[in-house]
Image (cartoon, helix red, strand yellow):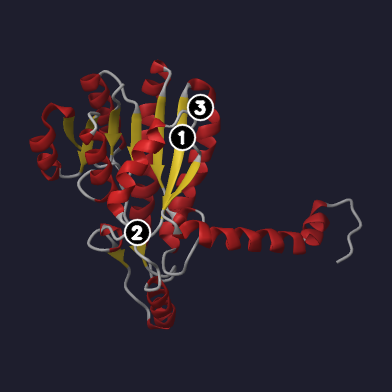
Amino acid sequence: MSKVWFITGTSKGFGRIWAQAALERGDRVAATARDPRTLQALVDRYGDAVLPLQLDVTDKAQADATVQQAYDHFGRLDVVVNNAGFGLFGAIEEVSEQQARAQIETNVFGALWVTKAALPLLRAQGSGHIIQVSSIGGVQAFPILGLYHASKWALEGFSQSLAAEVKDLGIHVTIVEPTGYPTDWSGPSAVQAEPIDAYKPIREARRANRGTWAPADPQATGPAILQLVDAEQPPLRVFFGTTPLSIIEPEYAKRLEEWHEWQWLAELANGNQEVTA
């Protein structure tokens, strides 16, 4: 049975690749973008299988109306993909208030508003799969990306709670955590904070380290996302790309080691116990 998708940020990047993958196999897609003119090529190629919609995910009223419009048009929603977002590059001290608020508004509240708009519809039909596009940056943090990490860690937190809340309602939630694919995320779509000279060495070290990563192919995520949404019991979290697991395994081992090392202090803070360091 073909699926009906609702995808945010479909003008380029993962959103575009995944929309094309779904359409190529005969699914239907409500494709959204801030500028719907960027969706015309999809309409020209796939015709009525595409519903192009204008959506600024930071506008809750528009998110509510757009999700409802897609549901009314197709009669159901099977896959809701919260892909819209951008990267904010800058040390914590460098990031302006406006940049920080815009990052959270788009990457956190944007996904939240679309999720909340879809939930009553998915509950009523007793099925659905919400895909939250996070990042390796949703489970690990690197310098010069602090506010981006904050947005993805927040997305992961509310999505894990959501998964527990809707698991008995026929609704699946999956957090996709891609590696650093060469998409517009770190290019034209990115926002750069005004640099401070004190952080130049950290920036240069990060740039040199990224140069050692083997680039992954964004187009390969198309077949992968189809396998994910077709899974009978999809995972809560899944990496896209080979790099994240090699980063996270030592990171989590380090966390456990540090927690164990300082467990004596945790027990002291618990009270009513004699603790020896």
Q: Mark 1 points at which residue?
A: 173
Viewer-nearest residue: 21 or 42:
21
218 is higher (above) or lower (below) than 174: below
Which quadrant is home to the N terminus?
top left
Q: What element carries label 1?
A: strand
- Residue 166's disc number: 3
Q: Is mark 2 on a helix, strand or loop?
A: loop
Mark 1 to mark 3: distance in Å? 8 Å
From the top left corner, tell me how far across and down residue 151 is, in percent. 43, 52
Could you tell which of marks 2 and 3 lies nearer the N-terminus?
Answer: 3
Query: Given the current orientation, which residue lies at the most extreme left position?
Result: 44
Viewer-nearest residue: 252 or 240:
240
Q: Name the residue under label 2.
A: 216
Could you tell which of marks 1 and 3 lies nearer the N-terminus?
Answer: 3
From the top left corner, tell me how far across and down residue 178 is, in percent. 40, 52
- Do the residues bearing badges 1 and 3 touch, measured as CB atoms within 8 Å? yes
Disc 1 residue crowd, few under 14, some 14–19, many 20+, Cα 10 Å = many
From the top left corner, tell me how far across and down residue 14 is, in percent. 29, 48
Mark nearer the viewer, 1 or 3: 1
From the top left corner, tell me how far across and down residue 262 is, in percent. 76, 63
Mark nearer the viewer, 2 or 3: 2
Amino acid tagged 1: Val
Amino acid tagged 3: Val
Q: Is residue 244 something that shows in the picture?
A: yes
Mark 1 to mark 2: distance in Å? 25 Å
